[in-house]
């Protein structure tokens, strides 16, 4: 693969049939060669001191997670660190399998990577920075958050997903000295060989670390099989087209055509398929030339790596000493909800019915600190306190409840409180349908769930709705701080984040012909081919313990305003859309809730939701209103409105505008009526009542 100018993407495409130990096919992406980098390599190697002393390198693992398996354990990190150190000290067990002629040039970098025990702020650390973030689902450069000073630490970000087909990537100091992305992003399956780690991927971080210290692919960073015209700049790695397999007899290029290579070898060697910088699945070695380059880079003042191993920095990061220091940190007091009523996915907020259970879970199983003592506080719960690691708590009464955990270990204690973490629903509904939630004056018991605890979440605002009245706003607009040296001008860094807006409980058990509708406006900077944001609508009949998806709007169908990028999106009148869907009621719909779930992209701007309407008929099943209909709908301004299906006794008709103002009222009689209302263009709510039954629907006047 060719030399790159920004960041290298280590793509790993799985074969059509494989298991955990199956062979993997590696590919790389095409980037034009950088002749300046080759020139720098030549200069570095020409002036190499060929030192061999031990270089201790402080590292920090930033584990981005959402309480899933991607929140890997401390043991898995330790396992990877052992793999990494074995590879860089030529102690990996499979190094003895290296075949001739490369068995005589196996290099020993003599780097020892150690987890930092002192954080940049001077506090003790175990070298693992756990960050709850949706960016774990993205895994591109925007995931490189909370970076520690790259002159003092090697930053490694562990994520759940990366760019499709990519298991890890980094930047090479010979082509990119941008201090904003100095570090490595890697998939959690590529970390270690225990936990979520995959044994067949154990050398991925070695490969990435090699690039972090100046190495390129043995194929010169070209596309696999492309050409013999590219070089990695290392004299003892034969010219190669690159290999994604382990045929040790392959000789893809004639080294006699390259004067420098032939002068070194004196013959045409086969490809060094077992090299850590190859793309095969049998990587086992660095060459002496590669080791010389890495040590030259780490000792050079030109490439921001020369402070890492200095005695002053080792003392500052807590990595000095003959043996790796032991972290003396207090246990983690973070926690989540493990389950409620058999929901096994960890989550941040809980909604249950009165009298139901919630199980909580700590994160200390990920980090062994010796004996840890737990002290839970559950105001309003039973038990009210607990010393257990994963207690189960019952809540009898409706309301919001806080939860607090204090975790104490040999090196101190930490405390975490989550306010309003549990919502217990009452046995009664807040509203009876059909109904209109216009949000003009308040949120009417609607709940916002800020799943990432960030600055963007659903909130009720007094202006900004369809008629510039009240509505709900999800503020996704991101104002980049251009004074920061590493700001991303357009990235909002929220890709994959979720926010929920949950309705009050509605009694729909005696309603028929139900249609749910709402208005929304959404702005995005995405172009049609890159739109990935999603809005989903769910319903729950069990107080929000389980949700059933009813509607999904995604990609370009969701966006009402493109190019909404450089400022906070405020929708124009013609940028609102109405969405509706039928809802079949049952006798169990005595306290049914609805939920909006928005999944953002890095292009997301603001989302507005207004006028949540439950159309239909309220009353007994043989109500005289059950066959009523309004036509045409939409209607034309100044035209007539037809009402059919009305039978029996008289009924009362009211028409209100979307702000709730009464604009028409009439007593109806007869089965088929024509009304001249002289309504202006807009959205209206028609209500017909008769003998305790109610019919409610929207009317659009064009």
Image (cartoon, rainbow, N blue to C red):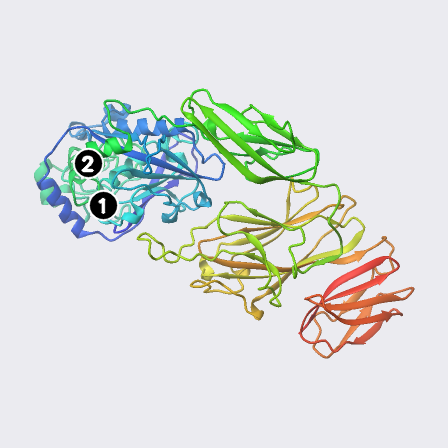
Secondary structure under badge 2? loop
Give residue 18's mark: none
* Mark 1 neighbour density, 10 Å: few (under 14) some (14–19) many (20 or more): many
Q: Position of residue 403 (x, y in %)?
A: 57, 34
Give residue 173's mark: 1
Give whichever of discs 1 and 2 has the lower sequence position: 1
Q: Are marks 1 and 2 in contact (CB under 8 Å)?
A: no
Give the residue displayed 86% in from the left and 57% down from the top: 692
Examine the rendered structure and indicate whether residue 361 appears above or below residue 570. above
Q: Position of residue 666 (x, y in %)?
A: 83, 71
Position of residue 303 in the picture relative to residue 428 (left or right): left
Quadrant of the image occupied by residue 85: top left
Label 1 to label 2: alpha-carbon separation: 29 Å
Give the residue displayed 36% in from the left and 45% down from the top: 144
Q: Is residue 247 visible?
A: no
Q: Residue furthest right?
A: 649
Q: Position of residue 531 (x, y in %)?
A: 48, 57
Q: For the residues carrying marks 1 and 2, which lies nearer the camera in this image? A: 1
Residue identified by numbered label 2 = 270
Q: Position of residue 683 (x, y in %)?
A: 68, 68
- Which is nearer the eye, 679 or 22? 679
- Which is nearer the eye, 391 or 691? 391
Q: Is residue 70 visible?
A: yes
Position of residue 686 in the picture relative to residue 621 (left or right): left
């Amino acid at each position: 693969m060719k030399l790159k100018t920004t960041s290298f993407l280590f793509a790993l495409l799985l074969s059509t049939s494989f298991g955990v130990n199956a062979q993997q096919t590696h590919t790389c992406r095409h980037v034009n060669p950088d002749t300046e980098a080759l020139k720098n390599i030549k200069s570095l190697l020409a002036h190499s001191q060929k030192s061999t002393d031990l270089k201790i390198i402080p590292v920090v693992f930033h584990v981005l997670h959402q309480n899933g398996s991607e929140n890997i354990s401390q043991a898995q990190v330790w396992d990877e660190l052992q793999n990494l150190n074995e590879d860089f000290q030529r102690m990996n067990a499979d190094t003895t399998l290296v075949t001739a002629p490369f068995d005589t040039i196996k290099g020993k970098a003599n780097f020892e990577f150690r987890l930092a025990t002192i954080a940049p702020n001077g506090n003790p650390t175990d070298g693992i920075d756990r960050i709850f973030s949706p960016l774990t689902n993205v895994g591109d450069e925007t995931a490189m958050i909370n970076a520690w000073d790259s002159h003092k630490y090697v930053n490694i970000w562990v994520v759940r997903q990366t760019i499709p087909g990519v298991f890890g990537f980094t930047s090479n100091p010979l082509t990119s000295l941008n201090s904003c992305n100095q570090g490595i992003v890697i998939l959690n399956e590529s970390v270690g060989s225990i936990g979520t780690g995959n044994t067949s991927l154990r050398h991925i971080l070695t490969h990435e670390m090699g690039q972090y210290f100046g190495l390129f692919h043995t194929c010169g960073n070209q596309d696999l099989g492309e050409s013999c015209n590219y070089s990695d700049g290392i004299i003892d790695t034969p010219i190669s087209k690159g290999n994604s397999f382990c045929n040790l007899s392959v000789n893809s290029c004639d080294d006699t055509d390259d004067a420098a290579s032939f002068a070194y070898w004196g013959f045409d060697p086969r490809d060094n398929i077992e090299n850590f910088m190859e793309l095969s699945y049998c990587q086992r070695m660095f060459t002496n030339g590669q080791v010389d380059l890495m040590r030259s880079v780490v000792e050079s003042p030109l490439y921001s790596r020369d402070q890492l191993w200095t005695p002053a920095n080792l003392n500052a990061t807590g990595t000095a000493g003959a043996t790796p220091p032991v972290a003396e940190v207090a246990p983690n007091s973070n926690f989540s909800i493990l389950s409620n009523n058999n929901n096994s996915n960890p989550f941040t907020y809980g909604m249950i019915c009165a009298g139901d259970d919630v199980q909580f879970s700590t994160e200390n199983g990920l980090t062994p600190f010796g004996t840890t003592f737990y002290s839970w506080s559950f105001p309003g719960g039973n038990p009210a306190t607990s010393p257990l690691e994963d207690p189960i708590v019952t809540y009898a009464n409706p309301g919001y409840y806080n939860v607090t955990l204090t975790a104490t270990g040999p090196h101190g204690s930490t405390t975490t409180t989550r306010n309003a973490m549990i919502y217990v629903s009452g046995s009664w509904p807040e509203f009876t349908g059909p109904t209109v939630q216009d949000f003009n004056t308040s949120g009417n018991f609607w709940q916002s769930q800020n799943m990432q605890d960030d600055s963007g979440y659903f909130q009720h605002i007094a202006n900004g709705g369809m008629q510039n009245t009240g509505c709900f706003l999800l503020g996704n607009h991101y104002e980049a701080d251009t004074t920061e040296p590493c700001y991303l001008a357009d990235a909002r860094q929220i890709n994959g984040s979720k926010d929920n807006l949950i309705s009050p409980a509605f009694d729909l058990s005696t309603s028929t012909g139900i249609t749910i509708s709402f208005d929304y406006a959404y702005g995005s900077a995405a172009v049609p081919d890159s739109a990935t944001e999603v809005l989903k609508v769910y319903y729950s009949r069990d107080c929000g313990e389980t949700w059933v998806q009813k509607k999904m709007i995604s990609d370009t169908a969701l966006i009402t305003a493109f190019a909404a990028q450089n400022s906070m999106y405020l929708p124009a009148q013609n940028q609102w859309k109405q969405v509706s869907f039928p809802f079949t009621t049952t006798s169990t719909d005595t306290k049914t809730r609805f939920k909006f779930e928005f999944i953002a992209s890095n292009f997301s701007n603001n989302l507005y939701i207004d006028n949540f309407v439950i159309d239909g008929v309220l009353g007994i099943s043989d109500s005289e209103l059950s066959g009523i209909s309004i036509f045409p709908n939409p209607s034309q301004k100044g035209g007539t409105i037809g009402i059919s299906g009305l039978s029996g006794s008289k009924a009362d008709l009211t028409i209100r505008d979307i702000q709730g103002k009464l604009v028409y009222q009439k007593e109806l009689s007869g089965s088929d009526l024509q009304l001249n209302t002289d309504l202006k263009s807009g959205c209206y709510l028609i209500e017909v009542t008769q003998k305790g039954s109610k019919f409610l629907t929207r009317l659009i006047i064009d």
